[in-house]
Image (tube, rainbow, N blue to C red):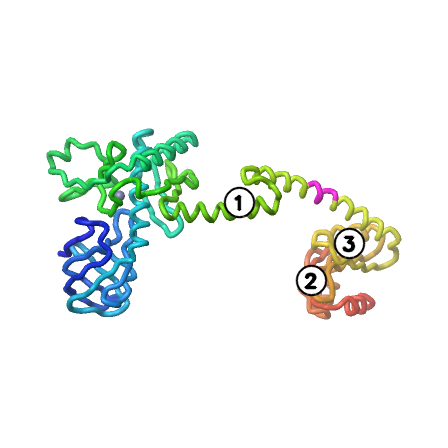
Amino acid sequence: MTERLYYKDQYIKEFEAEVVSCVEGKRGFEVILDKTAFFPEGGGQPGDRGVIAGANVTDTVENGDEVIHICDAPVSGTVRCVLDFDRRFSNMQQHSGEHVFSGVLHGMCGFDNVGFHMGENCITVDFNGVVTAEQLAEAERLSNEAVYKNIPIEALYPTDEELANYDYRSKKEIKGQVRLTKIGDVDLCACCGTHVAYTGEIGIIKVLSVMNYKSGVRISLQIGRKAFEDYCDKNRSVYAISNLLCAKTEEVADAVEKLQNRLKESDFRYNALKKELFAEKSKNASGEKCCMFDDGASADDARVFADMIADKVGIAAVFSGNDDEGYKYAVVSRESDVREIGKALNSALSGRGGGKPNMIQGSVAAKKKEIEAFWETV
Ligand SMILES: [Zn+2]
């Protein structure tokens, strides 16, 4: 049975221990110590990382009463152990912050936290009820107020009798000694994880997003140092956008909307002008066949343009592009089946594409001169 130092003091960063066993497993060397400050994955909190006698601990998991350290090299004897405490502290901030938020929301709406995941980018908490935007904003505000109050976070080990009188949150039936995490009158919850000692250490509690999930909601949160880093990233983005648009930071969304509307108008105008240009270019087209080039037309434009010319000639082709990047093509005819032309075109000019009897589309990797020479043979 591994002695769990993290329940005595969650701030232990370094310690000495005896190796009880070390066997090679699928993920690395599985090391059991007589005592450990490494927290094994549980209750939504990831397992700790760090170093044991020079070997990297890539994960820590639980197996019954034992804590298994997954190491990238074998270790033995008396070992010096060092936790990646920056990561552990961030996990404690997030876990404690999650308790505060879940406790506040539970107090407000009565909903229970039914799923908790601490990911690399953010944490998600699932609740068994749908919350409104106003409730969410209020829960976020009250959670941060609880942080400012710097409330002690305590671990309680109640007797069965005491436990029967407690109103606490719990995801599942627990056998044996129940460990409760108490945060003033904000939250009381059965939990095996590690927590900061005071809510002030949690830092920012920020709701990122909410989505409907099963019969409730999944809420994404940023907490503590991760929330601060997220703030820095977003601040950088907002200032970059603000500079690009010459808009105040608080007005960037409006500025982007204006820009989008202007773009829509420009697109509309551009398309109208393009149609006029095609009509003008195809004005004098006549005869059996006609092939035109346009360097700025999209595949759709080429089709529309070819279709316009096909009103006046037997077979109309439009090639859009340039000699360096190749050409997109559209061939249209009202009377003939143009699929054979397409096949010949693809094989002569390293092309690909096809379509219906009266219209084919594709692209070729050829030069304008080669295309013109080919068109002579059609
Ligand atoms: Zn917990």
* Above or below: residue 128 compared with residue 17: above
Instruction: Please give the residue where the numbered disc 3 appears in the rendered image.
Output: 306
Q: Which residues are magenta?
A: 265-269
- In the displayed structure, does residue 203 sit left or right of residue 165? right
Secondary structure under tag 2 reads strand
Instruction: Say which of 367 and 330 sits in front.
Output: 367
Q: Can you identify the residue that label 1 sits on?
A: 238
Q: How many marks?
A: 3
Crowding at mark 2 (Cα within 10 Å: few <14, some 14-19, many 20+): many
Mark whose residue sits in front, 2 or 1:
1
Distance of label 3 from label 1 (alpha carbons): 45 Å
Disc on res. 363: 2
The kind of residue on which mark 2 rests is Ser
* Residue shown at the point (42%, 49%) measured from the top left: 229
**Disc with the residue nearer the chain's start (3 vs 1):** 1
The residues tagged by marks 2 and 3 sit, at their Cα atoms, a distance apart of 14 Å
